[in-house]
Image (cartoon, helix red, strand yellow):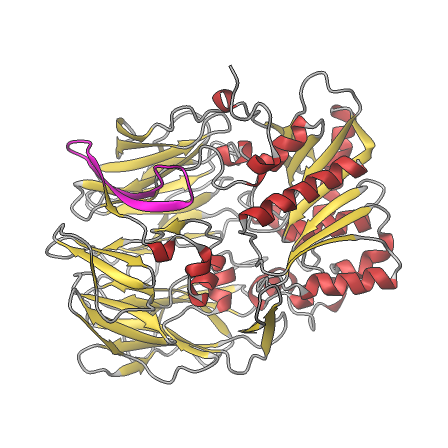
Amino acid sequence: MSRPFDDITIEQVARYPRPGMTVPAAVRFTPDGAAITYLHSAEGSLVRSLWRYEIATGDRTVIAGPSAASTAEAQLSREEELRRERTRMRELGVTSYAFAPRSAVPVLLVPEGGGLTVSAGGGPLAEVPGCEGALDPHLSDDGTRVAFVRGGELWVADVPAGNPRRLTSGACDGLTNGLADFIAQEELDQERGFWWSPDGTRIAFIQADSRHIPVYPIVHQGKDKVEIEPHRYPFAGQRNAVLRLGVATLETDDITWADLGSDTDIYVPRVAWRPDGVLTAEILSRDQKQLRLLAFDGPAPTVLVEEHGEPWVNLSHDTRFLKTGEIVRSSERTGFRHLYLHAPDGRELRALTGGDWTVIRLIDVDEPPRRAYFVATREGAAERHVYSVSLDGGDVERLTSGGGWHSAVLSPDGARMVHTWSSRAHAPRVALCTSSGEQRAMLSENAGATAEELGLQPPELVTVTAEDGTLLHGAIYRPPSGTPAPLPAVVSVYGGPHAQRVVDDWAMTVDMRAQYLARRGFLVFVLDNRGSANRGLAFEAPLQFHMGDVEVRDQVAGVRWLAAAEGVDPGRVGIYGWSYGGYMTCMALMCAPEVFQVGVAGAPVTDWDGYDTGYTERYMGTPKDNPAGYRESSVLAHVDGLRGKLLIVHGMIDENVHFRHTARLMVALATAQKPYDLLVYPEERHMPRDAKGLEYQERRVLGYFEEHL
C-alpha cells in the first residue's frame, strides 16, 4: 500500500503545516474547569478556529470561526504583521483568545479581523464597539473591561458596551505607551506591554521611548508602489529604548511612575501584580548579568531577590506569587535551572529541585496542596517530562511515562491536566488526565500520524565527542539501505544559543528538507554544539565573547566522526542553516573549507555589529569592550577562506536580520574575488511565508546540493 511520503516531492517539503502537526494548540481549561478550549484546524490547514470540549460529555463545538479578514497575510495590518513576525507565527484565523479568570459569569475574548469580540455567560460572540485596530487586548480579571493599545496609546473599554477611552497621552513616532519595545519582543520573550491589577482598578504599562534611536528604513521594492517602513533598530553598542513603568488609575485617570532607579540603561523584561495588589517587576542590567526582582510597595521599591549570573542571566517566566505571600521562582545559580521557594520578603526558604538537569518551565502551582508542576530534562537532554514536587520539600515525582516530548496544562482546581506528547515515531497526541498523570479521555488521537504509516524515517539519535571530551548530541537521517558508499553528507545547523534541535520529538521527523535529502542519497546530520541550550550554563558558556569558533569546531568534530563511523565521503560534505544557522554556514565554509565544500546560508548575520543590542551583547559584550571578539566573529573577516560553493538566501524586508548583512557580504566577496550564488526575496521577512516562494526556495536549495555534491 502506498503511503503519503513514500516518494517525497518538493511541494511536500515546502508545505505548512507539517504532517501530523494540526493538533489542538493554545489549550486551556475554562475558569470553572468544566471544559477545555483550544485552537484547531479540522481541515488540516493553517487557518484555525476556537473549539470547546465538554469534559462531562465529550461533546465538541466550534465557538469561534475565522473571519474573512484573518485568513490571509495580505489582509493583516502592518502592526499585526510585525507582531506575528516577533512570535514566528504562521497560523491564521483565530490565533488568540482569553477568558476572564475571575468573572461572575464566563467572559471570553476573541480578537477578530482587527476588532474585538466577546462572549458573556456562554452567549454568542459579539463585537465590542469602537475597538477597531486594537493591538494586544487583555480582559480585566472580572471581565467587565478590556484594555488594548491603539495608535501607540493605552485604551480601556467596557464589556460589552464598548465606549473606549484613552488612558495615556504623548505617543508619537518613536514613543509608545503599553507596547513592549522591539528588544523585549524579539530577544527577551516579552510580548506584553501592560498588565491589569487583580482588582481591575489599575493598569501597569511600559512606556518605551526610542526617539533617540536613528531610523533604519526598510524599502519594499517588490510591490507596484514603493513603501518605506521606518524601524528604530538598536544596533549592538548603541542606545536602547528608554523604558518607564507607569500605573494608570482608571477612576481618576492619574498616572504614577515606578521608581526603577537612577540607571535608565536597563531592560524591564517581566512585570506582574502580586495577589495583594502590589506591583512587581524584574529589572535586568544592560550587560544582562544582574537581575533584580522589585516590589513597589512603598516610597522606595523593595528588592526581593537579586542575583548575578555568569556568563549571563537567562530569563524565564517561572516567578509565581502565592496567596500566602511566598514566591516560587527558578534560578540557574548552580549552573542548571532549578526551582526555589522564597519567603514573602524574598529570603530563600528551600530548593525544590536540584541536580545536573534543567527545569525547562514551571507549569503552575496548585496552592492548597502546595505542589509545583513543571517540565524538565531529568530523564535526559533529548526528552521532556512533566513532574511535580511539594513546596514543603521532598522527592520529585514524574507524572509522564514513556520516552519523547511531554508538556501539560493544569486545571484551575489542580485536579486535572491536559497532557500533550509526541516522539520521533508518533505525532503529538493530546489527552485529559488526572493531575497524577492517569489518562481519562483523548482529545486528539492524531490517528494515522506515525512515521510508519506516513512513510517517514525517524532520525537516529547519536552521541559525538567534542575535541575537549564534551559529549554532544546528534541525529542522523539515513538514506535508503543499499545507497552506494561512501555517502555524501549534508549538515543541518543552527548552532546558536537559546536553541536545542536534537530531541525525541515529532518535529525532528517532519523536517521535510532532511527527509527529502535522505531519500535522494544524502546522509543528513544535526548536531547540538557547545553553546546551545538546556544542558546547563557550562555547556553554553564557551561561545562567550567569540561566536562562530567553538560552534564550528564542534561541527567539524561531528563531520569527522561521520567519516569514521558512518562511511561519509569527507570530500562531499554540505551544510545549511537559517539565521544563526546561516551565519554558521558561512563560518564553516570559510573557517573549515577543508571539511565543508557546499553551503546554503539563509538570512545570515555576517557581522555582529549589525545585529541588535539585546541578543548580541548578552553573548559578545559591546563592540567597544570586545573589539577583537567582534572582529574574529565576523563572517566578513574570513571571506578569503572560502573555497567551496555558497548560496545565500535572504528576504529584503527582513526587519530582524537586515538584508544589509547579505549586502555587506556581497561587497566583501566581490573584493576578495570569491564567487557565490544569491537568492533574494524582495517581499519576505525573516521567516518566509509565501507558499510559492517557499516552493521555489526548496527547488533552488535542494538542487544546489544535488548539483554540487
Residue 46 sits inside the magenta stretch: yes
Looking at the rendered image, the quarter that the C terminus falls into is: top right
Give the number of callouts.
0
Residue 456, position in %: x, y? Answer: 55, 25
Please, is residue 26 above or below residue 118 in the view? Answer: above
Of residue 531 and residue 171, the one placed in the foreground of this image is 171
102 to the left or right of 282? left
Residue positioned 77% across, 30% down in the render: 488
Q: Quadrant of residue 248?
A: bottom left
Residue in view at x 43 percent, y 82 percent: 172
Picture quadrant where residue 389 is located: top left
Q: Residue furthest top?
A: 1
Query: From where the camera sits, is residue 494 visible?
Result: no
Q: Position of residue 687 (x, y in %)?
A: 55, 53
Q: Give the range drawn in magenta.
A: 37-61
Judge left or right: residue 109 versus residue 494. Answer: left
In terms of image quadrants, where is residue 631? Answer: bottom right
The one nearer the camera, 465 or 671, is 671
Looking at the picture, tell me which residue is in the foreground, 392 or 201: 201
Image: 172 above or below 638: below
Closer to us: 239 or 512: 512
599 to the left or right of 430? right
Q: Does the magenta stretch include residue 6?
A: no
Residue that extends furthest to the front in the rendered view of this protein: 224
**At 73% from the left edge and 20% from the top edge, which residue is drawn?**
483
Locate residue 608, reporting x and y percent: 68, 63
Residue 51 image point, x, y percent:
26, 42
Residue 326 lies, with reference to residue 295, above or below; the image says above
Q: Is residue 69 visible?
A: yes
